[in-house]
Amino acid sequence: MIKITVPASTANIGPGFDTLGLALNLYNIYTFEEYNNKLIIEGCPDEFKNENNLVYKSFMYVANELGKNVKGLKIKIDSNIPVSRGLGSSSACIVGGVFGANALLDGNLSLHELFEIAVKIEGHPDNIAPAIFGGITASIVDDNVPYYTKYKIHDDIKFCALIPNFETSTYQARKLLPTEVSFEDAIFNISRVAVLLKSLEKGDFNLISKSLKDTLHQEYRKTLIYEYEKVEKICKDNGSKGFFVSGSGPTLMNIVDSYNFALDIEDCLTTLDYKWEIKLLEADENGVKVEIL
């Protein structure tokens, strides 16, 4: 039996649209074992207990790459990453399936080969890179080959995710984005990404706040997030050091220097129309974990 543990991830991180990603200490756990000529999937809604399951499809993609015949498979899913909330749930499923297949089927694929396959399935590397390698990553695709580099985050930096009881569609969120941007907006974001990465490394909360500003996606995507302005005001009034949309939303992420922040905003959030779950998180520096049981 193979056990794969995959962290959640938050992508974009303000100005780093489709480029930056950060692994968080919230995990999905997948176990894989060969089974008697059947496909058994446990731990997910009934509509996904079949060959359309993303974990299974990712597993089979690697099995085909390896030329392995899978006669039967049992997958158990212990899911802690909320679905369709901008926390990398689909990337976690893909990484779980890809690494599960390589381990269970005695594949000899390298870490970068597994990364390439996972990106090919997902279509972009911004959530895949941190899910595999941990920490905060910047990624690119050049000639259809993905590459990444990893940065450090200061130990004083903590994260507070506000996860609402509604979903947003990544497809709809992307449709809102303009097909062209101004030269000034491009410079605005490029400069802030450069400053943001060093600020996160140094733990410079003043610069983090300034460099999290964005002109490419958040102003458009926040229109899909109910009560965005109210939540933003509550967070900033109570000392949030940085506020941004996690992925395409609807989760809203805070960078904080103390977990007291969660207590300070709790009562304010209860006055809103929607329920916002407060989840205190830290960066995961290790990425995907593979165990043979």
Image (cartoon, helix red, strand yellow):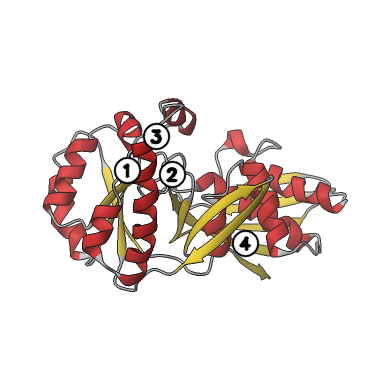
Residue of label 2: 17
Label 2–label 4 contact, CB within 8 A = no
In this rendering, is residue 128 above or below 222? below
**Left of 121 or right of it: where is 191?**
left
Q: CA distance from mark 3 to mark 2?
A: 20 Å
**Left of 220 or right of it: where is 78?**
right
Q: CA distance from mark 3 to mark 4?
A: 26 Å
Amino acid type assigned to the residue bearing label 3 in the image: Glu
Q: CA distance from mark 1 to mark 3?
A: 22 Å
- Give 270 or 95, whichever is nearer the viewer: 95
Q: Which mark is nearer the camera, 1 or 3? A: 1
Amino acid type assigned to the residue bearing label 4 in the image: Ile
Amino acid type assigned to the residue bearing label 1 in the image: Asp
- Tell me residue 15's x, y (percent): 37, 47
- Tell me residue 44's x, y (percent): 56, 43
Which residue: 18% across, 50% down? 235
Amino acid type assigned to the residue bearing label 2 in the image: Phe
Residue of label 1: 214
**Left of 287 or right of it: where is 272?**
left
Residue of label 4: 4
Which residue: 70% across, 42% down? 57
Residue of label 3: 167
- Tell me residue 70's x, y (percent): 83, 49
Dot 1: what SS? loop
